[in-house]
Image: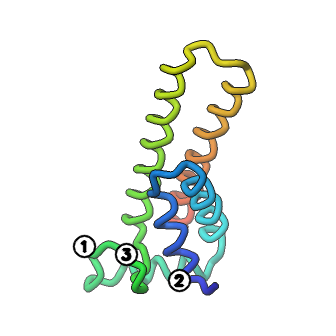
């Protein structure tokens, strides 16, 4: 796959309702954001006034920094909601379950950190 399709795929996965897709999307996005050429591509899209206000699609629009930030925020909110639902089902989880829940939150916050760092570089 090329860079554009990888960015679009990770963008769409990170806003998915499926937990496994969100996780793979976040992992892929973190890797892509560490590459200069993907940051340049996103920066070009973000700087272009003609692309503002249009959501990326599978047709080839590159997500902007704002699009990515909103997607990561949505993913974070879905993870928190998922963990709250799990806590309601099992208010006293095992230590391994607690560790897994902490890792879920740490992973999405790591994605947010990498996104902010890439956007500011």
Label 2: how many Cα within 10 Å (few below 14, some 14–19, many 20+): some
Tell me if label 2 and label 1 are in contact, CB under 8 Å. no
Q: Name the residue: 27% across, 82% down.
A: 49
* Residue that carries the numbered disc 2 in the rendered image: 4
* Residue that carries the numbered disc 3 in the rendered image: 56
Q: Quadrant of the C terminus?
A: bottom right
Q: Residue furthest right?
A: 96
Which residue is more in the foreground, 54 or 83? 83
In whole angstroms, how far apart are the C-alphas of marks 2 and 3? 11 Å
* Residue that carries the numbered disc 1 in the rendered image: 53
Q: Name the residue: 48% across, 67% down.
A: 11
In whole angstroms, how far apart are the C-alphas of marks 3 and 1? 10 Å
Q: Residue furthest front?
A: 89
In whole angstroms, how far apart are the C-alphas of marks 2 and 1? 19 Å
**Is residue 2 depicted above or below 27 in this figure?**
below
SS at badge 1: loop
Q: Quadrant of the N terminus?
A: bottom right
Which residue is more in the foreground, 13 or 63? 13
SS at badge 2: helix
Q: Nearer the viewer, mark 3 or mark 1?
A: 3
Q: Nearer the viewer, mark 2 or mark 1?
A: 2
Q: Position of residue 35 (x, y in %)?
A: 65, 75
N-term mark: 2 or 1: 2
Label 1: how many Cα within 10 Å (few below 14, some 14–19, many 20+): few
**Is residue 11 depicted above or below 62 in this figure?**
above
Q: How is the image coloured?
A: rainbow
Direction from residue 29 to residue 66 in the image, left or right: left
**Is residue 108 depicted above or below 5 in this figure?**
above
Q: Name the residue: 57% across, 57% down.
A: 21
């Amino acid at each position: 796959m090329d860079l554009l399709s990888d960015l679009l795929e990770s963008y769409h996965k990170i806003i998915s309702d499926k937990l496994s897709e969100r996780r793979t999307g976040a992992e892929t996005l973190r890797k892509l954001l560490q590459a200069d050429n993907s940051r340049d591509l996103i920066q070009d899209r973000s700087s272009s006034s003609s692309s503002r206000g249009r959501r990326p699609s599978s047709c080839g629009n590159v997500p902007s920094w704002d699009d990515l930030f909103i997607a990561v925020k949505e993913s974070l909110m879905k993870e928190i909601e998922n963990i709250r639902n799990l806590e309601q089902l099992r208010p006293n989880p095992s230590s391994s379950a607690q560790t897994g829940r902490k890792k879920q939150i740490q992973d999405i916050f790591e994605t947010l950190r990498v996104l902010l760092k890439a956007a500011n570089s």
